[in-house]
Image (spheres, rainbow, N blue to C red):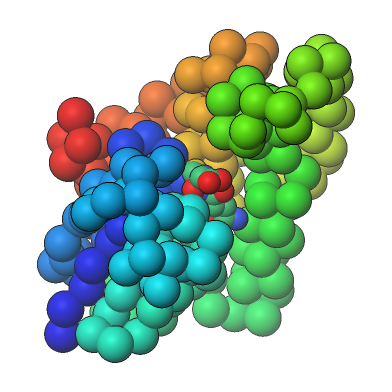
Amino acid sequence: MTITLYGIGPSRSFRCLWALAEAGLEHEFVSLDLSGTGSNGAKSPDYLAINPQGKVPSLKHDDFVLTESAAILSYINSISVRKFIPEDLHGRAKYDELAFFVLSELEQPLWTTGKHKFAIPEEHRVPEVLATAQWEFDKALNALAKLVSINEFVLGNEFSFADILLAQTFNWADRFKFKVPSNYLDYRDRMYARDAAIASTARYE
Ligand SMILES: N[C@@H](CCC(=O)N[C@@H](CS)C(=O)NCC(=O)O)C(=O)O
């Protein structure tokens, strides 16, 4: 069984690196250049055959290829002996709810900022949209506070992959200089102090 994760530094691919480390699954990490078209370029023909959008992360498990960070976390959980996503009906549903919320609501203002600052071609960037991003992020934070209360972990009393999704997104917001409440940053710090997170950070630093 060979697992390869394609990604780049502290991007969404960190979610998957971290999850692989929590699960103790051996893997190779291939660091890509996001705009490159040559070898190790995310826009090279070889990589586009794996991920037609030329995005990261992508996971290859023998011949099986999977994209989308949250789907990759679910897959890692499925092949891991230890489980990191609740298995009971309502626990799993609450995990999905939070995962979809992070991807469709919380991270969107961050991604909008990234796209309009550097990720999309200059002629398509709209600087005016940046001022709206913090407002949208605050709105999502208010919704998050109604959805879950974060104690030691975000779902119940155990670490789950929901903690990876949420802590990595808070970290992303902090790196992008968004205002993040201090209790959420404390939670991010606690999660990033886990052995698996520290070991995964060391993979790209
Ligand atoms: N929904 C995807 C988003 C993937 C994504 O947009 N990744 C960014 C890096 S974090 C990327 O590859 N950007 C390069 C590009 O848009 O060309 C996921 O969660 O995996």
Q: Position of residue 76 (x, y in %)?
A: 37, 72
Q: If the image is split into quadrants, where does the C terminus sit? A: top left
Q: Is residue 115 left or right of residue 26?
A: right
For this rendering, which residue is in front, 138 or 131?
Answer: 131
**Can you say whether 106 is above or below 2 in the image?**
above
Res 99 visible: yes
Q: If the image is split into quadrants, where does the N terminus sit? A: bottom left
- In the figure, residue 114 lies in which quadrant? top right
Residue at figure coordinates x 49%, y 19% from the top left: 175
Q: Is residue 175 left or right of residue 108?
A: left
For this rendering, which residue is in front, 83 or 50?
Answer: 50
- In the figure, residue 181 lies in which quadrant? top right
Q: Position of residue 179 (x, y in %)?
A: 66, 12
Residue at figure coordinates x 77%, y 16% from the top left: 127
Q: Position of residue 159 (x, y in %)?
A: 42, 52
Res 138 visible: no
Residue at figure coordinates x 62%, y 63% from the top left: 95
Residue at figure coordinates x 59%, y 79% from the top left: 88
Count of numbered labels shown in the rendering: 0
Q: Is residue 16 left or right of residue 137?
A: left
Q: Position of residue 34 (x, y in %)?
A: 40, 43
For this rendering, which residue is in front, 45 or 131?
Answer: 45
